Image: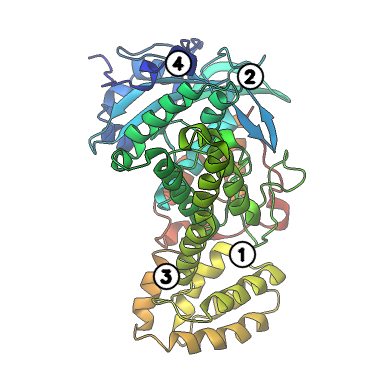
Amino acid sequence: MTVHFPFQNTYSALPANFFARVAPTPVAAPRLIKLNRSLAVQLGLDPDLLSTPEGAEILAGKRVPDGADPIAMAYAGHQFGHFVPQLGDGRAILLGEVVGKDGVRRDIQLKGSGPTPFSRRGDGRAALGPVLREYIVSEAMFALGIPTTRSLAAVTSGEPVMRETVLPGAVLTRVAASHIRVGTFQFFAARGDTNGIRALADHVIARHYPDIRSAERPYHALLSAVIGRQADLIARWLLVGFIHGVMNTDNCSISGETIDYGPCAFMDAYNPGQVFSSIDEMGRYAYANQPRIGLWNLTRLAECLLPLFNDDNDKAIEEAQFILSEFPDKFTAAYQAGLRAKVGFFTAQDGDEALIQDLLDAMAKNEADFTNTFRHLGNAAGDDGAADVRAQFMEPSAFDEWATRWHARLALEPQTPAERKAAMHAVNPAFIPRNHRIEAVIQAATMNDDYALFEELITVLAKPFEDQPPFAAYADPPLPDQRVLRTFCGT
């Protein structure tokens, strides 16, 4: 049998200036590393057929499946605050869209599938390391319940790629609700193409926000809806210690998914100013800056939508500013609700925000591990179990002082310690994709063609809220000589 993709393409039916039609560049000898079988089934694909040599050729871009309409999407973007009027998919090709068994339309895109008209002298390829990183982290985010693009497959290409050194090449099959970004709107706004902005906005509303089609002012409602999703998304990032690393407007998804796992990382020791990205020299996208940058990106989206708001530009700006003012409250509500759940509060009471901030301040001062502190806190909700939390602090007395006030606050609610622990463990993961573990996976795969660590890590991360005693070591923070202080973009 032949691998069949039930494509139903809509983006490639938009005007020709939205994309460039381009086929993937065939690779020499594709080999399947990993197929996400459960995701394949959800998409209506046959995982057994995808696992065949023919399937590997499709997932590597060597063979284009029937019904595909391969395109590279056009977009612009602010990169570290500097506007670039044309970026686009320089090493990714959208094969098409499928409607899964859940009725949701999703893009299937090959990342690392060869040059496109937007490659800007790049080779359009991906190295094995970044492909494995994106597979690991995107699937970990999914298991954590955070909106994200997902990874359907990773394949080696059988060809080398040249970066700082010669590295094995690979292709990632990425699945997304769509690949439309703030930068997609900026592409048309930079050209004064109001018709293009309107066509894109109408497409986004139909695809992602159909409930606002009948709104009195649908484009205003669109901005408000995107703001809501981004506020919730960034709050979720902070609640698990995630740092995106490159929050450019071309990496800000209109659907509200986490997209583009380049120099991303999860914090070990809590530090609001933490930066991992090797290219973020000024800390623009540091952990604690992410809400502010989210609003900055959304402001750029609002600027694009102004011609659709009002013919009077001053009134359009006033209307956009009013909608943008929703972001702080929406973000704060999501973030504070998440923090209350992390420390075991079932209700909101005066003083909660200050009490939780005191814990975060103590964690920062004592270099406490972010994930382990909150995970062990569930055990400390009773009369014992505090030892594991205290061990996270350089000066355990800092936790003791806070814990006295915390227990007094817990006493105001009727839940039992067991009920509270269960609720806390449901939101505080035991396992995250720690940087040193990802680095070990990449080294083993790149240097020795060994994927045992990769398989084990994704197995652990698929159940982040379970203790998994056989894999307890995966919860350990890195030793000093294991720390990964810088992460790199895959291009």
Q: Quadrant of the N terminus?
A: top left
Residue 369's disc number: 1
Q: Amino acid at mark 4?
A: Ile
Q: Nearer the viewer, mark 3 or mark 2?
A: 3
Q: Amino acid at mark 1?
A: Asp
CB under 8 Å between callouts 1 and 4?
no
CB under 8 Å between callouts 3 and 2?
no
Q: Nearer the viewer, mark 2 or mark 4?
A: 4
Q: Nearer the viewer, mark 3 or mark 1?
A: 3
Residue 133: x, y in percent? 55, 38
Residue 161's disc number: 2
- Crowding at mark 4 (Cα within 10 Å: few <14, some 14-19, many 20+): many
Coloring scheme used? rainbow
Element marked by disc 3: helix
Residue 424's disc number: 3
Element marked by disc 2: strand
Q: Nearer the viewer, residue 339 or 464?
A: 339
Residue 71's disc number: 4
CB under 8 Å between callouts 2 and 4?
no
Q: Amino acid at mark 3?
A: Met
Left or right? Give the position of 365 relative to 310. Answer: right
Q: Amino acid at mark 2?
A: Val
Between marks 2 and 4, how big is the CA–CA gap? 23 Å
Between marks 4 and 3, how big is the CA–CA gap? 44 Å
Element marked by disc 1: loop
